[in-house]
Amino acid sequence: MMKDFFGYLKSKVFLKHLLLSVLSLAVVLWILFKLLGVYTHHGETAEVPDFKGKSIAELENFVADKHVGYVIIDSVYSPKEQPGIVIKQDPEAKSLVKHNRIIYLYVTSTQAPQMAMPKLVDRSTRQAVFMIESYGLKVGRITEIAGDCKGCVLKQYFNGKEIAPGEAIKKGSKIDLAVGKKEDNYIAAPSDSSSVIEDPEANQ
């Protein structure tokens, strides 16, 4: 019995059927790979468009014929930029990617973030101006009032009212300062005794 079986394995009939089976399998696999390539757009690429400067409202129409998608993943506050504008993308423009690749976008925030007001009182005018700018705030009016120290900050204001350190304030807000103007015959006086508007640049 075993002898007949091994004899069949060596016969031309078996070899012929084996060859046909291998060829059939190869053809089937080739067709499957071709279909898979079509389904996944294998070998097809798209050039990433330049999203920078585009507004959120125009993104849908912008990508309609670009063979890519997009997702907004973060917003960044930038007082110098218009709100709702793309300022960064990943991958970068003109990169080659597969069809329907998702492009990740960063846009400017429509609202300024809140922060804690820094303590400027008792600092020199130069230090206060530096802190205001480093915190993302803006330098407003700098006025001089009678005080026991020359050039040091005595009061800090926002929208005409004193603002205490730690109070919530939006980035980009304008901060006014009242700084001391010491005189030789200085005697403690009310805070509104005098006021002279100075150019912030003069204290740099």
Image: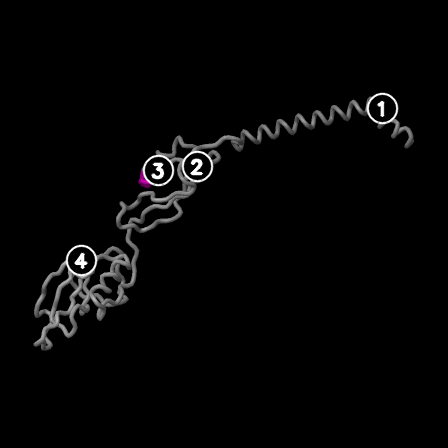
User: Which residue is identified by label 1?
Assistant: 11
Q: Nearer the viewer, mark 3 or mark 2?
A: 2
Query: Disc 3 residue type?
Result: Leu
**Mark with earlier residue (4, 3):** 3
Instruction: Specify the label residue 95 is tagged with.
Output: 2
Part of the protein shown in magenta: 51-57
Picture quadrant where residue 138 is located: bottom left
Q: Nearer the viewer, mark 2 or mark 4?
A: 4
Q: CA distance from mark 4 to mark 3?
A: 42 Å
Q: CA distance from mark 2 to mark 4?
A: 45 Å
Query: Disc 1 residue type?
Result: Ser
Q: Residues within 10 Å of mark 3 (few under 14, many from 20)?
A: some
**Mark with earlier residue (2, 4):** 2
Q: Nearer the viewer, mark 4 or mark 3?
A: 4
**Above or below, comparing residue 90 to residue 36 in the picture:** below
What SS does tag 4 mark?
helix
User: Which residue is identified by label 3?
Assistant: 59
User: Which residue is identified by label 4?
Assistant: 201
What SS does tag 3 mark?
helix
Q: Is residue 57 left or right of residue 69?
A: left
